[in-house]
Amino acid sequence: MTMIGLALSLLVVIAHPDDETLFSAFIHSLTQKVEANVDFVCLTNGEGGFRHSSASEFLYGNLHLSDETNAREHLSRIRQEELFNSGKILSIRRIFFYNQIDLKYTTDVESIFNEQWNKTLISQLLEETLRYGYDFLLIFLPNGNSHGHHTASALIALETIERLKKDSNFKMKIPTVIGGSEFVLTSPLIPFNSLSKVENKTFRFDRRWKLNCQRDHLLDYNLIVLWTCAAHKTQGGLIPSTLTSLARDYEEYFYFSINDDVRRLKSVENLFKDLTKLHQEKRYGDE
Ligand SMILES: *[C@@H]1O[C@H](CO)[C@@H](O)[C@H](O)[C@H]1NC(C)=O
Ligand SMILES: *[C@@H]1O[C@H](CO)[C@@H](O)[C@H](O)[C@H]1NC(C)=O
């Protein structure tokens, strides 16, 4: 790639092991097509994800994973393993687990900070992780319709970036923050706060773009999305929802206004322009 001399690096902040499947196509193209280094931060231990675990019980020593008490004892270890497996498909370099409790579903972000997670600790851990130095930070696009853990993870990341921008002791580069949407947005976004404002500009990654494999030129990124979903065997609802309620042709990404630097905006524009070009060029099998 001509866009950057050095390998590009990206840190992806997810709330649960399996959230990365929402961004699988984009991530896979980065590691495979532009040789980016991509790391994950996973905030929760995923122990609350037992609702659709029964089909996988035979794979895991017949532990009754759909039973809450059992799940809270065993799921976190199993789901870490599942995230490593998905990470292999996406060629992820490192995965950082922050082990916050995955207590329950709520859209009430404040209650997550009060009853579930230690926000101060997460922000400290994220600062430590950011010392590895990243060009880009991919977080959830904060959204009132989302799982509160998703929104909360994004808000903590944005607050951490804002804090580090003002901290003269933080010598590492501050990454450019982009938000990934969980679904195709049909109405304008209402920002949660001043930090979560995005530019009115959508960057799209088309999952129907071909993988450009030499011997099988019809395969597209939907294959990668489903492979990563299939890595999460305890999440029996994931493939059905990916094929129905969450089905979409495009992954959509947004640029946060707090990046506040026209060169950063250019770098995101160039990245998506390059990815588009790369996938639209005539490749294997074209006439
Ligand atoms: C949250 O983490 C901070 C920083 O590590 C720690 O000082 C504090 O005691 C923790 N709070 C709770 C309620 O555990
Ligand atoms: C966003 O930009 C589009 C054109 O690209 C415009 O039609 C729309 O009104 C804008 N929305 C807002 C909220 O500014």
Image: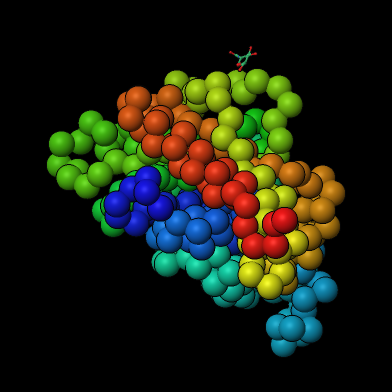
x%, y% of residue 249? 74, 44
Which is more toward the observer, 226 or 142?
226
| Residue found at x 50% / y 59% | 33
Residue furthest front as drawn: 287
| Residue found at x 70% / y 57% | 286
Would residue 56 be visible to someone looking at this image? yes
Q: Is residue 38 left or right of residue 140?
A: left
Would residue 125 be visible to someone looking at this image? no
| Residue found at x 36% / y 33% | 264
| Residue found at x 82% / y 74% | 55
Residue furthest left as drawn: 169
x%, y% of residue 128? 29, 54
x%, y% of residue 275? 53, 46
Which is more toward the observer, 83 or 32?
32
Which is more toward the observer, 272 or 1?
1
The correct choice, above or below, for 59 with respect to 82 in the image is below
